[in-house]
Structures are given as structure tokens and as C-alpha cells.
Amino acid sequence: MADRDGAAIYQAIVRKRAIVCIGSLIGLVLLVLADLMIGPSWIPIHDVVTTLFDGPNGETTSTAIVWSVRLPMTFTCIFVGASLGLAGVKVQTICNNPLASPYTLGLTSGAAFGAATAIFTGFSIAGILWLGTAVLAFIFAGGVSLAIYMVGKMKGMSTITIILAGIVMNFFFVALQQLLQYKASAEVAQLIASWTFGSLTRSSWTSVAVSGCILVVCAIFVTRYVWQLTALTTSEENAKSLGVDTESVRLKMFMSASLLTAGAVSFIGTVGFVGLVAPHCARLLVGEDQRYLIPASVIFGSLLMLAASITAKLIGGGSMIPVGIVTSLVGVPALFILLMKTRRWE
Amino acid sequence: MTTLDLDNVGVSFGNNIVLEEITTTFKSGEMTAVIGRNGIGKTTLLKAIGNQIKRTGTITFDDGNARALSFDDISYVPQMSSTQTRLTVFEMVLIGLLRDLRWKVTLEQIQAVTGVLGELNILHLSEQPFFSLSGGQRQLVILAQALVSRPKILLLDEPTSALDLRHQLIIMDLARNYTHSHDVITIYVVHDLNLAARYSDSIILLHDAKIRAHGTADEVLRSELLEAAYNVRLDIEKTGAGYLTITPIEPL
Amino acid sequence: MVKGIWSIFLVLTTTACLLAAGCVTTNSAANNTDAQITFTDLAGREVTLDSRPETIAVGFYIVNYLMVGGDDALDKLVGLAMDSWDGTRYGEYAVFTSTYPKLLEANGEIVNIGSYHDDTLNTEKILQLKPDVLLLSPSQYSANNEQVKTYENAGINVVVIDFNSNTLETHTRSNRILGMLLGKEDVAEEQIAAYTAAVNDITSRLADANVEKKAVYVELGNKGPGDYGNSYSNTMWGSFATQAGGINIADGQIEKYGSLNPEYVIASNPDVIFIGGAIWSGDTNGDQMRMGYTISEETARERLKKFTERPGWNVITAVKEGEVYGIDHGGLRTMIDYVYLQYIAKALYPELFEDLDPQATMEEFYEKYLPDLDYTGTFMIKLDAT
């Protein structure tokens, strides 16, 4: 009798979460289709499907639009949102702070400074400007996380250390970037500023491949640690008493979060709030069990980005509103609502 | 019967010697209370046994074949100050099986959880979120978390501090029953000497980084030993019902 | 006694005044040669100069200044806003400083009075320099509004001209003012006449011909092919595209300038595409569009080609038919920029403007007004060398 009760109890606890995950996955598919349909030239759903099946070598305008413009953008949306959602949930777990995000840890401002440097100096790789910008952004984001890692090694990778180091990095690199903008000519300064509004026009099949690979690798990597992360969310001591090497776990999660963030923003620019709001939403709906929280954060991240992309297209019409602006504008009230809804911790 | 042997165990932080020459034996089915002044090293001793900190010396566990302690043998329950989570009671206990949990939770694991929840009489709290529980209930859950993995050695660091009277007794009763029925070695740190007196098969008194005494309550809870260890004049009496009571009188 | 002295004082003062008035009246033969110069500048200010300025400090439009004034104007130049000139307009900087070494800051012959690009002016240096006239662009004027009062109080005449708005009227009035200031009214009028004629010519030909309008896409190629740079609507290249009789696909999508949605560009299927180039940062190894002074045709074509290889551009009519052109972004804002209008018109409706030769017209202009300048470079180019 106790067995059946036990199983029943367990099912009752996890059922709702499974439903949320599956439901949001369905929502994701729907939004993907919507994103492929919506744009300055509306393409009805059956045209989208036909064009997809026809392959990328057609000569019609629809082919060009769907295959060269929309598909890379949609996939980038999905992968960037997913990466930020995954990075966000990792960061929030290891910092034990729902306001932590890749943004507040200085990772995105490191990337922005790298991009600013590339734009300022005209740095290019194989003669390609946007590649040079992306690579330098990536390197600088990595540099920031390495610096924080060094601090962590010296002072111990505690929650406070990570947060403080991140704040310092943030201010430092934002200041450097502003310095570059000040010294640059008006046009270059405008270029630097516009990079900081993440824009999907910078998507390409290359960016899709890179961020996709990183996402898959990091997602697989994290599955080993799901229960350790769940334990970590209860408290440091509790996790330690259960045998979790908390410093090592935090370190690994931090490095993979850095990789994810770098892969996400180096190509398209800064996208804020997704890494903050997605895990928050997910946590409200599925709780702290990382087996559900992590997939939910990933899916919600993609959902948020797709919603932002669709909104940007609807508002923008023929011009291109950077998706990073939409996520910021929407993110603030969303966060506010979430904070109101979050039950007060004792 | 299983035994836990400590041989010349020591712990130091830098030049600061916290524990030295700790040599003693624990037997299964027995509860041992570790007492002594604040900061004397009680928690450190627990952590040394529990593989939580570096130590010198050897610790041998003999359950038929003598071997070093592995993590699977121990459950260490630290002082629960800041644990706070929305996880349900069921899940909190479930993660006590952390080392064996895979993505999919097996039926045996579920049964283990419900089993221990039943033993501790908190099965009815299963679906409640941890943070909504009272202090006493939380401690029960933490205890369940420690017990679900069927440890051979149970280490409790001040399990009753900040609990109301009723829950203090409930926790200690449960710990004792578990110790005796499952034949485990239980070592716990406590401040309340009366609890120590009542809930122990043996007591260790720590003083000056060493074991000052290790024996039954009658052997260890003597005024000369305690007054030297605590710097307090004490009054030790037996009540009519046979409970040893220790009343602090004045600081020395 | 006091009354006596007072009366003599009054008589003397009155006589002095009458004499002075007499002098003033005889001198104000208002024909702006040796005497007063009066005009309304492009910020709507009434400017009155007692005589032609001997010393001039230029905040902006040094090229226009020299185009009207030539070597004489160079003699009068005492100050120039030079910071980051090389970073903002490298080609122009290289060519002008080598032809006119006086412009090189390192030579110390003129005072550096501020930034070439961000409207910052060095007030102290300007006050120390005390030029007769300080020439400013509209944005410099509005950014330095407070300081202008200080300059005026110190006896410096601030004159605002505007070649940025790129309209016939503003170009005309601004050039006329330059003519007045530099004593080259005839040169100025010549340039104005040529400009007006060219613009009217195009407008009337288009009106008479009733051609089927073509769709045009203009983009500033400063981000390289990997990202979409700004397009223009009703300003700069956008207004040229419209004046040349094209349908600017950016109209209605952006205000003034902004980048377009790549999808929209593909879907609009423009008939002709213009990519604006310049030298934006010293590095020449990237893939920004390069046009202007010192740039070779090979470089320009090479860079232009990469833009046509953008994802999805293979289906655009302009790309399929090779109707892709590069234009020098630095070419705007001068009295010869109408050649770009001609070039665009010619590209859109070749049959209608067959007789126009914008490149030759441009070269003639340079030969005539800046004969010492080595203007080697690429300013207008088609992708396929036909």
C-alpha cells in the first residue's frame, strides 16, 4: 500500500511539470511556424511548407526569403534563446540568486567590448568583418569568465565571489566600451552602439551551426549534474552533506554558462533579460527539480526569443527593429510581474 | 556487529591544532553524544569522520572486512541553518539518494522514500513544500533525508538546537529507535547535557583538543570532569524516575 | 558758468555726431565690395560684417571653402577643426593634406580648433585666435549654442552654412555666402548656376519622358556584406534616388535613415542597387564598401561583388542583371555632388540620360576649381565594367 501511495505521490508531484514541458514544446513548434510565416512579406503557411520541402536551391523570391533570411533567423532565435535560457538557469542555481543572469555577471558586456574593439579597429577574419567581430566578442566573453574563474580559484568559488566579480567585470567593460565609443568617429560609434542592440539580421548559417553545437554539447554536459544542482538549490551545507563537491560543480556550470552566453551573443549582439526571465518563468511553473527546470528554461528561452522576434517584425515592418531592444522592453515589466508573483522567502 | 575505529586522528588548520590523538571505537547499535565547550572541536570531529575535511590518522570501518570509510556508509547531517527550498518534502528526502539517482527515478527509490517518511511519521507532509514547514518538521525531513540511503554511520550536528521541546524529544526518540532497530552507529553533537545524558549509550567529552573521557553517562557526567571542561559549577542529580539531570550553578 | 560749459559740450558733441553720420552715410554704398556684407545665414541669423574678413576659422566644410576660394582662401585660413579628420574621412584627409600642407596639423601653420566629426569646439583656442569669421555647420552651431554668444561678444562673427541638407536651396545659399566671405562671388555663382542647371535638366527630362519608374535600393556599405547598413529616405542618397526618378524602397519604412529588414529588401526586388562606400577605419583588410579618394577600381569592384553574394540576393533583379553600383559616400555635401544625382539617373534610365558623363563633369570641376588637387580615386562604379 505504501508503495502505491509513494508512486502516486511521486507522479502527482511530477505530472504537472511534465505537462508544462510538453505544452511549452508544442508552443515552441507553433511559434516557429509563426516566425517563418511572419515578415515584411507575409508567406502563408502552405507556401512555407512547400518552400521548405523544395529545398534551398529554388529561384523564387519565397525560396530566397525562407531559406536565406528566415530560416537562419528562426534557428538563431531558437538556439540563442535556448542557450541563454540554459546559461541563465545554471547561473541562477550556482549563485542561488534569482536576479543573477549572464548579463549581470559581466559576460555580455565583455562580449560587447570585444565587438566594439573589432569594429573600432576594423578587425576582420579572412577579410570578413562580421566574423572578426563575432570571434573577438567570443574571445572577450571567454576572457571575462576566465578572469572570474581565476578569482574563484584564489578566493574560493563561492556565490558571493561570483556575483561580486561579475559586477566588477560588468562595470569595467562597459566603461571601456564607452571609452572606445567616445574616441571613435561618429559613424563608428554608431556602429558600436548598434551592435549592443542584438539584431537577428546578423544571423547566418554559420552562427546557427556554432550556437547549435555549443547548445547541444552543454545540454548533454549538464545532464550528469541534474541531481547535484537540485541539491545545490537547497543550500550549500545540505548539498555538501550529500556529497556534492559544490565548488567543482559551480565552476563547471559557470564555465559552460560562459560558453553558452558567448556563443549566443557573439554573433548577434547583446540580448538581455532572456537569461533572466526564462529560468524565472520556468521555476514558477515547474519548481526546482532540475530535470524539469533545465529543459523548461531552455524551451522558455527559445519561446521568449521567438516571441520577441515576431513582435519586432510586426512592429518594424520594412525596417529592422533589433530584437535585443524588444527583449529589454518586454523583459522589464515581465520581470516585475514575476517578482510580484514570487512567493516571499522567509 | 560493526565497529568504527579512530586511530590517532588529528585535525589542524594551519598552525592551529583543533584535534589530536583521537583514538577510540564506536559500536553499531549505539548512540554516542559528543559534548564539550563551544569551539572545542565537536563539529570538527564529526566532519573528520564524515569525510568533510582533511585529517591525519586512520579511520577503519569493520563490518566483516575492515576497510576505509566510503561515502556510501555515512550520512552527515550538518546544522540546518539556511536550507530553504520550494522542493516538496518527498523530493527533499529523495535527494538523500543523490549518489544513486539517475534521470529516471526507480520504484525502489520511491519505496525507500515512502518507507523512511513512514518511519518518521511524516508521510502526510509528502507534497508540502519544504519552506512551509515548521522548524521541527524541517528537522524531521532532514533526518529522513539522511536515513533514506540506509547509512551505516549517522552523524548529527546539533540536531535539536532551535527546536521546540516536543520536537527535540521526537527527533531524539526517532534517532535512538533507528539506531537500535537498524544497528547503525550514531554519533551526535549536542549542547544540552540533559539530552546527552538521556539519549546516549556512550558519551565523549572533548577538552584541550583531546578526548578527555569516553564512557557511559555515569562515567563521564561527573562534576570534576564537567567543571574542568566547562568552567562552570554544576549540580548533578538523579531524578526519581532515574533521569540524570545536570543543573548549571555558576561560572567558575 | 556751468551752463556755459554744458552748452559748448552739447554743441561739440552734436557736431561730432553729424560729421560721423556723414561719414557713415557716404560709406554705406551697399554693394558689398569693400564695405558691409549682409546676409541671412543657414541658421536664420542676420549676419552683418563691416568688411570682408581677413582671417577665417573653419569648423566644417573645408572642402567647400577651398572649392570656392582656392589658394586665396587658403591664405585667409587661420584655424580648422582637425581632430580625427584622418579617422573620419581618411581619403579626403590624405589627399587634401598632401596637396595643401598648410592643412596638416603637424606643420603648425594653422590652429586646431576642435573635432572634425563630433561638434566639439575648443572655445579657448577660438577666442585666442580671434578670427574675423568662424564658419560652422548646423550641428556644430546647435551643439555650441552657448559658446556662440561668447564668440560674438568677443567680436568673432559666427556664420552657419549648410551643405548637409543636400537641397538645391541650401546648397545655393551656402555657396553664395562662401562667395561673399571670400570675395569670390563670381566663382560661387558659376558653381550655383551649373548645379541648378543640372538638377533642373534632370527634373524636366523626367517630367517630359514619362518613364516607368524603377525601384531603387541604396545602402551604406560600412558594415560589410555580413550585416545590413543604413538606407536613406528623403535625405542624402534617398533624396537623390527620388529626384533621379526612382522609387526608393526605403520610403515609408524608415525615417531619414535606418537599416532595412533583409527580407524586405529581397521581397521588394529592386531594379537597381547602390552601395555607398568610404574609408571608415584605417584597416583596409575588411569587407566594408570602399570608395573615394585613393581607392582603386579593383578594390571597389572586389568589395562591391561581395555584397551581391549575400544570402538570397541571387533572386533580386538588380543582381541578376548586374545593375549594382558603388558610390562615394564622401562625395555628398559639395557643389559638385550633382554628378551623383546624374550618375543615379543615368543608371536608372540610361536611354534618357545618355549624353551625361558624370565622371567627366566631376573631373572638369576639380581641374577648374582645385587644379592642384590629386583626386585619383574611384567615386562612381558599376559592378561589371561595361
Image (tube, coloured by chain):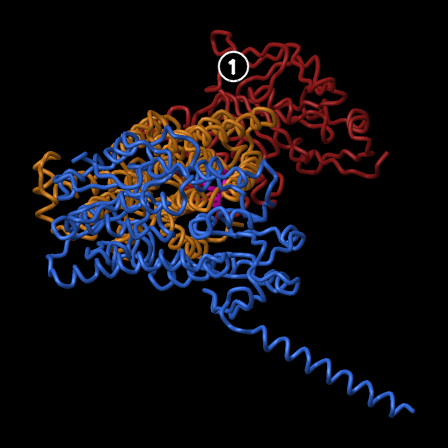
Chain colours: A orange, B red, C blue
Q: Is residue B98 visible?
A: yes
Residue at x 92% of width, y 91% of height: C1
Displayed quadrant of residue A142:
top left
From this view, report whether residue A145 is shown above or below residue B71.
below
Q: How many marks?
A: 1
Q: Position of residue C104 (x, y in %)?
A: 54, 38
What's the magenta region? A98-107
Amino acid, disc 1: Leu
Q: Nearest the camera: B127 or C30? A: C30
Quadrant of the image occupied by residue A72 = top left
Q: Secondary structure at mark 1?
A: loop
Residue found 53% across the figure and 41% down from its top: C103
User: Could you say where residue B70 lies in the image, as x and y percent from the top left?
Assistant: 49, 16
- Is C147 magenta? The answer is no
At which x and y percent is residue C307?
25, 37
Q: Residue furthest top?
A: B65
Q: Chain of mark 1?
A: B
Residue plotted at (48% across, 12% down): B63
Q: Is residue C137 above or below residue A235?
A: below
Q: Residue furthest right?
A: C1
| Of residues A72 and C144, the one drawn nearer to the viewer in this rendering | C144
* A188 relative position to B164: left or right: left
User: Residue at coordinates 74% horizontally, 20% vertically from top-left?
Assistant: B16
Percent x, y for residue A16? 29, 46
Q: From the image, tell me which residue sits under label 1.
A: B69
Neighbourhood count class around disc 1 (C-alpha, 10 Å): few under 14, some 14–19, many 20 upward = some
Compare residues A17 and A161 and report the one nearer the observer: A161
The quadrant of the picture occupied by the C terminus of chain B is: top right
Q: Main secondary structure of the magenta part?
A: loop
